[in-house]
Image (spheres, grey):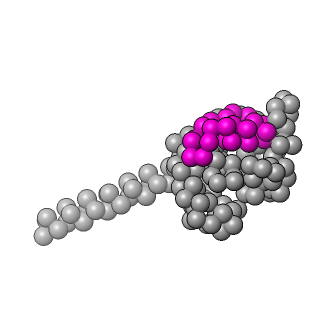
Amino acid sequence: MVRKLLIGVASAAALTLSVSAFAQKPQFGTASEAKALLERAIPVVKADKTAAFAKFLSGEDGFKDRDLYVFCANSGDGKINAAPSTVLGKDARTLVDKAGDHYGQRILDQGSAKGEGVISEITYMFPRPNSDAPVQKTAFITKIADQICGVGYYQ
Protein backbone atom coordinates (compact mmCIF):
# COMPACT_ATOMS: atom_id res chain seq x y z
CA MET A 1 0.00 0.00 0.00
CA VAL A 2 2.77 2.44 0.94
CA ARG A 3 4.64 1.42 -2.22
CA LYS A 4 1.62 2.26 -4.40
CA LEU A 5 1.26 5.60 -2.64
CA LEU A 6 4.93 6.45 -3.25
CA ILE A 7 4.68 5.47 -6.91
CA GLY A 8 1.56 7.65 -7.27
CA VAL A 9 3.24 10.62 -5.59
CA ALA A 10 6.37 10.21 -7.73
CA SER A 11 4.27 9.99 -10.91
CA ALA A 12 2.32 13.12 -10.01
CA ALA A 13 5.55 15.01 -9.26
CA ALA A 14 7.09 13.95 -12.58
CA LEU A 15 3.99 15.05 -14.50
CA THR A 16 3.93 18.40 -12.72
CA LEU A 17 7.61 19.03 -13.47
CA SER A 18 7.26 18.05 -17.13
CA VAL A 19 4.25 20.38 -17.61
CA SER A 20 6.06 23.31 -15.99
CA ALA A 21 9.18 22.63 -18.06
CA PHE A 22 7.05 22.68 -21.23
CA ALA A 23 5.39 25.93 -20.15
CA GLN A 24 8.80 27.58 -19.83
CA LYS A 25 9.63 27.34 -23.55
CA PRO A 26 11.53 30.49 -24.49
CA GLN A 27 9.55 33.29 -26.14
CA PHE A 28 11.76 33.30 -29.24
CA GLY A 29 13.29 30.59 -31.39
CA THR A 30 16.97 29.72 -31.18
CA ALA A 31 19.65 29.16 -33.81
CA SER A 32 19.49 25.38 -33.40
CA GLU A 33 15.70 25.37 -33.67
CA ALA A 34 15.87 27.53 -36.83
CA LYS A 35 18.39 25.23 -38.48
CA ALA A 36 16.35 22.14 -37.54
CA LEU A 37 13.21 23.70 -39.04
CA LEU A 38 15.05 24.37 -42.31
CA GLU A 39 16.36 20.80 -42.37
CA ARG A 40 12.77 19.54 -41.92
CA ALA A 41 11.60 21.79 -44.78
CA ILE A 42 14.11 20.49 -47.36
CA PRO A 43 12.47 17.12 -48.10
CA VAL A 44 9.01 18.72 -48.03
CA VAL A 45 9.99 21.19 -50.77
CA LYS A 46 11.69 18.44 -52.77
CA ALA A 47 8.56 16.27 -52.62
CA ASP A 48 6.02 18.94 -53.65
CA LYS A 49 6.92 22.60 -53.47
CA THR A 50 3.33 23.87 -53.93
CA ALA A 51 2.14 21.77 -50.98
CA ALA A 52 5.25 22.80 -49.05
CA PHE A 53 4.52 26.51 -49.54
CA ALA A 54 0.95 25.96 -48.31
CA LYS A 55 2.26 24.23 -45.18
CA PHE A 56 4.84 26.95 -44.56
CA LEU A 57 2.24 29.71 -44.90
CA SER A 58 -0.33 28.01 -42.67
CA GLY A 59 2.17 26.68 -40.15
CA GLU A 60 0.79 23.15 -40.64
CA ASP A 61 2.99 20.34 -39.31
CA GLY A 62 4.85 22.75 -37.03
CA PHE A 63 6.31 24.91 -39.80
CA LYS A 64 5.64 28.03 -37.71
CA ASP A 65 7.01 28.09 -34.18
CA ARG A 66 6.88 31.35 -32.25
CA ASP A 67 9.00 33.70 -34.43
CA LEU A 68 10.45 30.91 -36.58
CA TYR A 69 9.03 30.25 -40.05
CA VAL A 70 10.24 28.98 -43.42
CA PHE A 71 10.66 31.43 -46.30
CA CYS A 72 11.32 30.54 -49.94
CA ALA A 73 11.96 32.51 -53.11
CA ASN A 74 12.46 31.41 -56.69
CA SER A 75 16.18 31.48 -57.51
CA GLY A 76 15.46 32.72 -61.05
CA ASP A 77 12.90 35.50 -60.85
CA GLY A 78 13.18 36.17 -57.10
CA LYS A 79 9.45 35.75 -56.44
CA ILE A 80 8.82 35.09 -52.75
CA ASN A 81 6.58 32.02 -52.46
CA ALA A 82 6.55 31.53 -48.69
CA ALA A 83 7.15 34.28 -46.14
CA PRO A 84 5.30 36.77 -43.93
CA SER A 85 2.48 38.54 -45.75
CA THR A 86 4.45 41.81 -45.82
CA VAL A 87 6.83 40.37 -48.44
CA LEU A 88 4.88 37.43 -49.92
CA GLY A 89 4.74 37.63 -53.72
CA LYS A 90 7.37 40.35 -53.95
CA ASP A 91 10.67 40.07 -55.78
CA ALA A 92 13.28 39.22 -53.15
CA ARG A 93 15.89 41.13 -55.15
CA THR A 94 14.09 44.38 -54.25
CA LEU A 95 14.15 43.87 -50.47
CA VAL A 96 16.27 46.49 -48.72
CA ASP A 97 16.47 47.10 -44.97
CA LYS A 98 16.50 50.54 -43.32
CA ALA A 99 20.31 50.56 -43.36
CA GLY A 100 20.29 50.17 -47.17
CA ASP A 101 21.34 46.51 -47.16
CA HIS A 102 19.95 44.65 -50.19
CA TYR A 103 19.50 41.52 -48.08
CA GLY A 104 17.06 39.83 -50.46
CA GLN A 105 19.61 39.89 -53.27
CA ARG A 106 22.30 38.66 -50.87
CA ILE A 107 20.09 35.73 -49.80
CA LEU A 108 19.46 34.73 -53.43
CA ASP A 109 23.11 35.16 -54.42
CA GLN A 110 24.51 33.23 -51.47
CA GLY A 111 21.95 30.43 -51.74
CA SER A 112 22.68 30.02 -55.45
CA ALA A 113 26.46 30.27 -55.05
CA LYS A 114 26.70 27.69 -52.28
CA GLY A 115 24.77 25.10 -54.27
CA GLU A 116 21.92 22.78 -53.52
CA GLY A 117 21.76 21.31 -50.04
CA VAL A 118 24.55 23.48 -48.58
CA ILE A 119 23.30 25.45 -45.57
CA SER A 120 24.91 28.83 -45.01
CA GLU A 121 24.13 31.88 -42.87
CA ILE A 122 23.32 35.48 -43.64
CA THR A 123 22.57 38.34 -41.23
CA TYR A 124 20.33 41.33 -41.91
CA MET A 125 17.74 43.57 -40.26
CA PHE A 126 14.09 42.46 -40.35
CA PRO A 127 11.08 43.00 -38.04
CA ARG A 128 9.79 40.18 -35.87
CA PRO A 129 6.32 38.91 -36.75
CA ASN A 130 3.63 41.42 -35.69
CA SER A 131 6.14 44.26 -35.37
CA ASP A 132 7.45 47.09 -37.54
CA ALA A 133 10.75 47.57 -35.71
CA PRO A 134 13.63 45.85 -37.52
CA VAL A 135 16.03 43.81 -35.40
CA GLN A 136 19.08 41.78 -36.31
CA LYS A 137 18.17 38.44 -37.83
CA THR A 138 20.40 35.58 -38.90
CA ALA A 139 18.97 33.14 -41.42
CA PHE A 140 20.11 29.69 -42.39
CA ILE A 141 19.59 29.38 -46.14
CA THR A 142 19.93 26.68 -48.77
CA LYS A 143 19.04 26.02 -52.37
CA ILE A 144 16.35 23.39 -52.93
CA ALA A 145 15.75 22.75 -56.65
CA ASP A 146 14.76 26.18 -58.05
CA GLN A 147 14.07 27.70 -54.62
CA ILE A 148 16.24 29.46 -52.08
CA CYS A 149 14.71 28.68 -48.69
CA GLY A 150 15.63 29.69 -45.21
CA VAL A 151 14.67 30.01 -41.58
CA GLY A 152 15.91 32.88 -39.49
CA TYR A 153 16.18 33.58 -35.83
CA TYR A 154 16.28 37.00 -34.21
CA GLN A 155 19.17 38.25 -32.10
Q: Position of residue 22 (x, y in %)?
A: 46, 54
- The answer to which quarter of the image holds residue 7 is bottom left
**Where is residue 51 shown, x and y percent of the image?**
65, 68
Spot the residue most to the top.
Answer: 99
Above or below, comparing residue 137 to residue 75 in the picture = above
User: Which quadrant holds residue 49?
Assistant: bottom right
Magenta residue check for 43: no
Image point (12%, 70%), residue name = 1
Question: In this rendering, would 79 be left or right of 29?
Answer: right
Q: Residue 27: in sight, yes or no?
A: no
Q: Is residue 64 left or right of residue 40?
A: right
Can you give x and y, in whole percent of width and height, for residue 39 in the image?
A: 53, 51
Q: Residue at x 61, y 60 (%)?
A: 45
Left or right of 79 in this view: 64: left
User: Does any portion of residue 35 appear in the rendered image?
Assistant: yes
| Quadrant placement of the C terminus | top right
User: Which residue is located at x 83 percent, y 57 percent?
Assistant: 89
Q: Is residue 128 above or below residue 56?
A: above
- The answer to which of 51 and 12 lies nearer the viewer is 51
Q: Would you say residue 119 sits in the magenta stretch?
A: yes
Q: Identify the residue shown where x is 24% and y is 65%.
A: 8
Q: Which residues are magenta?
A: 103-124
Can you give x and y, in whole percent of width and height, for residue 72 in the image? 70, 53
